Image (cartoon, rainbow, N blue to C red):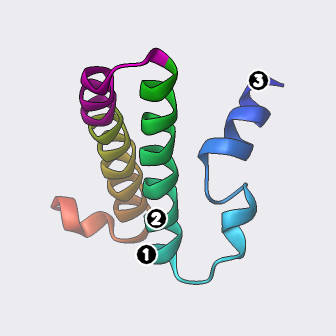
């Protein structure tokens, strides 16, 4: 159940962003939502310092997730990319 909830929010293949045909646009929208939540949480905490730290951590986390996804997709579609 927790995995399904996570997929619905964080995975653009399962959430309503899957209806966007251009994957670059879907990625941009996910990034904008992440930044929005950084701002929401920093305002909730009442500190711009929290926003900076939160934004950096979110950017690193999201970058890691997308780099991993791209690597997996490349391995699936073009395994020769990684050598013979």
Residues at marks 2 and 1, CA–CA distance in whole angstroms: 5 Å
Farthest top residue? 45
Dot placed on the residue nearer the N-terminal end, 1 or 3: 3
What's the magenta region?
A: 45-57
User: Residue 55 bears which disc, if any?
Assistant: none
Q: Quadrant of the C terminus?
A: bottom left
* Badge nearest the viewer, 2 or 3: 2
Residue 6, position as x, y percentages in the image: 68, 34
Marks 2 and 3 close (CB-CB < 8 Å): no
Dot 2: few (<14), some (14–19), or many (≥20) neighbours within 10 Å? some
**Residue lying at 77% horizontally and 34% vertically, measured from the top left:** 5
User: Residue 2 bears which disc, if any?
Assistant: 3
**Residue lying at 32% horizontally and 30% vertically, measured from the top left:** 51
Question: Principal SS element in the magenta part?
Answer: helix
Dot 1: few (<14), some (14–19), or many (≥20) neighbours within 10 Å? few
Read off the residue under disc 1. Answer: 24
Residue 21, position as x, y percentages in the image: 61, 83
Dot placed on the residue nearer the N-terminal end, 2 or 3: 3
Residue 52, position as x, y percentages in the image: 24, 31
Marks 2 and 1 close (CB-CB < 8 Å): yes
Residues at marks 1 and 3, CA–CA distance in whole angstroms: 27 Å
Read off the residue under disc 2. Answer: 27
Question: Camera-side residue: 25 or 54?
Answer: 54
Question: Camera-side residue: 43 or 75?
Answer: 43
**Residue lying at 64% horizontally and 78% vertically, measured from the top left:** 20
Farthest right residue? 1
**Residue lying at 31% horizontally and 36% vertically, measured from the top left:** 55
Residue 32, position as x, y percentages in the image: 45, 57
Residues at marks 2 and 3, CA–CA distance in whole angstroms: 23 Å
Q: Is residue 47 magenta?
A: yes
């Amino acid at each position: 159940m927790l995995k399904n909830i996570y997929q619905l929010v964080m995975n653009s293949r399962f959430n309503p962003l899957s209806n966007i045909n251009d994957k670059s646009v879907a990625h941009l929208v996910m990034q904008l939502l992440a930044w929005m939540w950084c701002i929401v949480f920093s305002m909730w905490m009442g500190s711009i310092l929290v926003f900076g730290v939160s934004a950096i951590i979110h950017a690193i986390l999201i970058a890691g997730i997308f780099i991993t996804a791209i690597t997996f997709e490349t391995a699936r579609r073009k395994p020769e990319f990684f050598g013979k």
